Image (tube, helix red, strand yellow):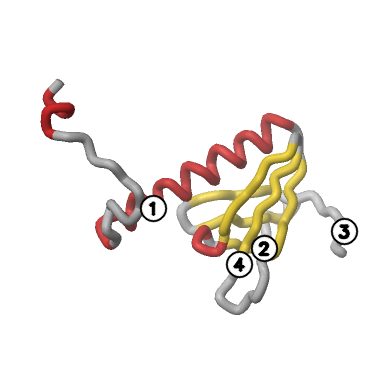
């Protein structure tokens, strides 16, 4: 069990960084490809991560006011969607479940 600590979350395409609010030093780094899922429960955001060396998922819980947790969740979601969008040419879009509009729909 770890003790709660104040952190400053920083999220981008290179991952989620938990920074020390005083020194801006990186305390923990979670590349987006290691974040397997997340769940919001009120003013808490549970992140589930799994690295190639992990057997089971690890849970990281961030707690803050509703606005902060909402902003973290929105930014995390946007970053993950951008990563999938950037990687989409590498994958078969139909495998990802992307449905492209028909030509007639584009003209309308």
Residue at the image position 51 percent from the left and 43 percent from the top: 77
Mark nearest the camera among 2 and 1 is 1
- The spot of residue 106 in percent (x, y) is 16, 29
- The spot of residue 28 in percent (x, y) is 67, 63
Question: Foreground residue, 42 or 97?
Answer: 97
Name the residue that disc number 4 marks. 50
Residue at the image position 67 percent from the left and 70 percent from the top: 56
Does label 4 or label 2 sit earlier along the sequence?
2
Does label 1 or label 3 sit earlier along the sequence?
3
Are the residues at dot 4 and dot 3 in contact (C-beta closer than 8 Å)? no
- Residue 33's place in the image compared with 79, above or below, is below
Mark nearest the camera among 4 and 3 is 4
Q: Please, what secondary structure does the residue beneath circle 3 have?
A: loop
Name the residue that disc number 2 marks. 28
Question: Foreground residue, 21 or 43?
Answer: 43
* Quarter of the view holding residue 51: bottom right
Name the residue that disc number 1 marks. 84
């Amino acid at each position: 069990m770890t003790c709660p600590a104040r952190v400053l979350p920083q999220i981008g395409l290179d991952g989620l960084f938990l920074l020390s609010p005083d020194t801006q030093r990186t305390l923990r780094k979670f590349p987006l490809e290691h974040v397997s899922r997340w769940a919001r429960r009120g003013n808490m955001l549970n992140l589930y991560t799994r690295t190639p060396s992990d057997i089971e998922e690890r849970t990281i819980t961030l707690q803050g006011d509703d606005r902060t947790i909402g902003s973290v969740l929105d930014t995390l979601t946007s970053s993950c969607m951008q990563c999938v969008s950037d990687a989409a040419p590498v994958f078969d879009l139909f495998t990802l479940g992307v449905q492209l509009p028909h030509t007639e729909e584009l003209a309308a």
